[in-house]
Image (cartoon, rainbow, N blue to C red):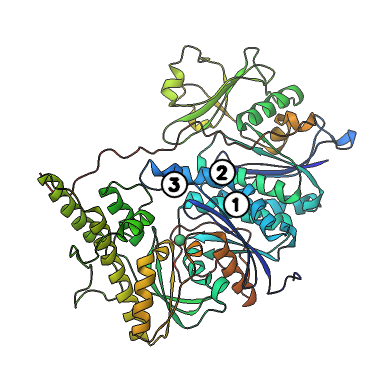
């Protein structure tokens, strides 16, 4: 069964076709990636995503109609880029008549890290006390969430200034932090680079593999829109 | 090509401001016009909040597509092409529509046309009155734009003649409504109140109408301040404000300038046809005065019904249908949104 997975919650657009029941010899965690792309695209997620979806389908040698489900990262992430991915997934799924599953982008990063630690002899480990995922929230803030050693989220996602994160009593000083390494200095610890990827997104979509019906695709905004109801009318005549 | 009588079956998506619009046309025939508005969510902020609008577009898109398809009695796979507003407008809001349109086009294997919102405001009239008279002058007025255009070919040759140098006409309506204690959006309230007032009660200024002023540009910021000063003077004196007279006199100042400049543009460019569009073209006094002045000057006026003047998906579909008929190439899969897309670009090229 072929699934299109995509994420636009970070500065990198991620798209891939994943087989969730591949031939036994080729599978990894029961999954086979047919084609994946990760492209840094800054503020051009819509433009990039439009070209990457046909590209991964072409590379996979499949047609749109062969997709059985769509998985999308719901963030947290900067709003405009995040919405491009969520809207794309919702409209694709609607047009194809297939379900769309939303997952927390941090869960996708964490699940992938935990899966790699269990299967790849490259030094990737998960400490017994768990780990933290951090991504860029712009405006000098970060999104972060805590995971246990099985890759299950136990706190978050939150949005905070790094200085406030470090000052929290429950902050895991000297613990493993993965995600956007730009925060290494501000979080006073090395952030091991990690981002969402199609396999991680599908692994984190537990409802998909369990055959459950998907929930609504609601982005994890975490912040309210910036807007204040106007105060009293400003007078134009000087008093 | 689909079997629908009238021409290609086009699904149009509009998200440039606070209306999520999905329209379906078959050539010049309107089959569906579904609109979900987030306007009530903006009311307490006194204006459209871009992030609020963008969130609402995402929530409303798929249900609005379903509503339009049900109304038209078609399924998305029946359509021949998809058109979407690529600009001008609010970037975050535009991108929701572009992402949705692109995904539907990709999934259904249909061509995608990224189109200009202003040109779509002109094109929509084909759904009510048939083929556009060309060449023509178009006056487009709304909360986001006020411009005079020369339209030689709606699918590829539009020349801007002038536009507002400060507030859009609709913006002036909203601001004056606030001064008068009326809710957002102000246009319909002022229109209604003005019916009970006198348009000659107060001589509010007509911006940029001096002999040396740019003949086709508009300015409404000075008018808005003049109304505020006039109201504040009465309030300070403890006198009652004749709200209906203020509304009528303000409205008259706006539509007087709009119609005078539109008629002048027609005369000076030798055009016989004037087309009105945009949300402010739903204003009853603007429609009436445009009618009177067009007739007095031997001009043929075309104004779509009010429901087609405000932002909607049908106008995008209408322009899409004209582009398909003209054989204009579709946009590429890397289509983005351009908040300042110039009106000279009717569709975003491949
Ligand atoms: Zn408009």
Check residue B99 in the rendering and tell me which mark sits there, or answer none: 1
Label 2 Cα crowd, 10 Å radius (few <14 / some 14-19 / many 20+): many
As drawn, is A218 to the left or to the right of B136? right
Where is residue B81, by image quadrant? bottom right
Seen from the viewer's position, the closer of residues A82 and A37 is A82
As drawn, is B94 to the left or to the right of B263? right
Residue pictured at 27% horizontal, 61% vertical? B248
Q: Nearer the viewer, mark 2 or mark 3?
A: 3
List x then y, in percent, for residue A172: 53, 15
Question: Mark 3 highlights which residue?
Answer: B50
Check residue A83 in the rendering and tell me which mark sits there, or answer none: 2
Residue pictured at 74% horizontal, 41% vertical? A99
Q: Nearer the viewer, mark 1 or mark 3?
A: 3
Mark 2 beta carbon near ligand 1 (under 8 Å): no
Mark 3 beta carbon near ligand 1 (under 8 Å): no
In terms of secondary structure, where does tag 2 sit? Answer: helix
List x then y, in percent, for residue A228: 35, 37
Seen from the viewer's position, the closer of residues A178 and A77 is A77
Seen from the viewer's position, the closer of residues B165 and B282 is B282
């Amino acid at each position: 069964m072929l699934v299109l997975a995509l994420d636009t919650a970070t500065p990198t657009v991620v798209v891939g076709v994943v087989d969730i029941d591949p031939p036994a010899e080729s599978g990894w965690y029961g999954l086979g990636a047919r084609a994946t792309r990760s492209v840094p695209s800054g503020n051009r997620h819509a433009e990039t995503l439009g070209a990457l979806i046909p590209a991964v389908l072409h590379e996979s040698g499949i047609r749109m109609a062969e997709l059985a489900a769509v998985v999308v990262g719901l963030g947290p992430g900067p709003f405009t880029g995040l919405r491009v991915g969520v809207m794309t997934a919702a409209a694709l799924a609607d047009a194809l008549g297939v379900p769309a599953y939303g997952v927390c982008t941090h869960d996708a990063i964490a699940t992938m890290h935990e899966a790699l630690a269990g299967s790849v002899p490259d030094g990737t480990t998960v400490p017994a006390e768990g780990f933290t995922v951090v991504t860029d929230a712009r405006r000098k803030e970060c999104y972060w969430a805590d995971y246990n050693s099985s890759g299950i989220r136990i706190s978050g996602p939150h949005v905070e200034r790094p200085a406030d994160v470090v000052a929290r009593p429950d902050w895991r000083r000297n613990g493993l932090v993965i995600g956007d390494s730009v925060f290494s200095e501000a979080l006073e610890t090395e952030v091991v680079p990690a981002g969402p990827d199609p396999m991680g997104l599908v692994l984190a979509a537990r409802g998909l593999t369990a055959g459950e019906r998907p929930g609504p695709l609601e982005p994890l905004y975490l912040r309210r829109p910036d807007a204040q109801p106007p105060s009293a009318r400003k007078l134009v005549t000087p008093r | 090509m689909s079997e629908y009588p009238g021409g290609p079956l086009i699904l149009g998506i509009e998200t440039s401001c606070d209306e999520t619009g999905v329209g379906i046309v078959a050539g010049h025939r309107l089959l569906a016009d579904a609109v979900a508005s987030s306007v009530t969510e903006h009311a307490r902020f006194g204006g459209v909040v871009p992030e609020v609008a963008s969130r609402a577009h995402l929530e409303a898109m798929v249900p609005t597509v379903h509503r339009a398809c049900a109304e038209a009695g078609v399924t998305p796979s029946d359509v021949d092409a998809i058109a979407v507003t690529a600009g001008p407008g609010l970037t975050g809001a535009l991108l929701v529509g572009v992402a949705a349109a692109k995904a539907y086009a990709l999934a259904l294997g249909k061509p995608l046309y990224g189109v200009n919102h202003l040109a779509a405001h002109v094109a929509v009239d084909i759904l009510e009155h048939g083929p556009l008279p060309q060449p023509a002058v178009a006056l487009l007025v709304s909360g986001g734009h006020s411009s005079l255009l020369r339209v030689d070919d709606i699918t590829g040759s539009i020349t801007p003649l002038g536009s507002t140098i400060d507030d859009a006409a609709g913006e002036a309506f909203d601001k004056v409504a606030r001064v008068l204690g009326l809710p957002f959006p102000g246009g319909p309230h002022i229109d209604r109140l003005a019916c009970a007032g006198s348009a000659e009660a107060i001589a509010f200024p007509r911006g940029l109408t001096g002999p040396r002023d740019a003949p086709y540009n508009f300015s409404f910021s000075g008018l808005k301040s003049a109304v505020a000063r006039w109201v504040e003077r009465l309030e300070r004196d403890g006198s009652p404000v004749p709200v209906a007279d203020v509304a009528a006199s303000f409205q008259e100042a706006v539509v007087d300038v709009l119609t005078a400049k539109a008629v002048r543009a027609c005369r000076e460019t030798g055009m016989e046809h004037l087309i009105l569009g945009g949300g402010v073209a739903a204003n009853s006094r603007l429609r009436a005065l445009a009618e009177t002045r067009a007739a007095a000057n031997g001009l043929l006026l075309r104004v779509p019904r009010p429901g087609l003047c405000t932002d909607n998906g049908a106008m995008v579909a209408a322009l899409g249908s004209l582009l398909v008929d003209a054989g204009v190439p579709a946009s590429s899969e890397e289509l983005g949104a351009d908040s300042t897309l110039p009106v000279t670009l009717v569709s975003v090229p491949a």
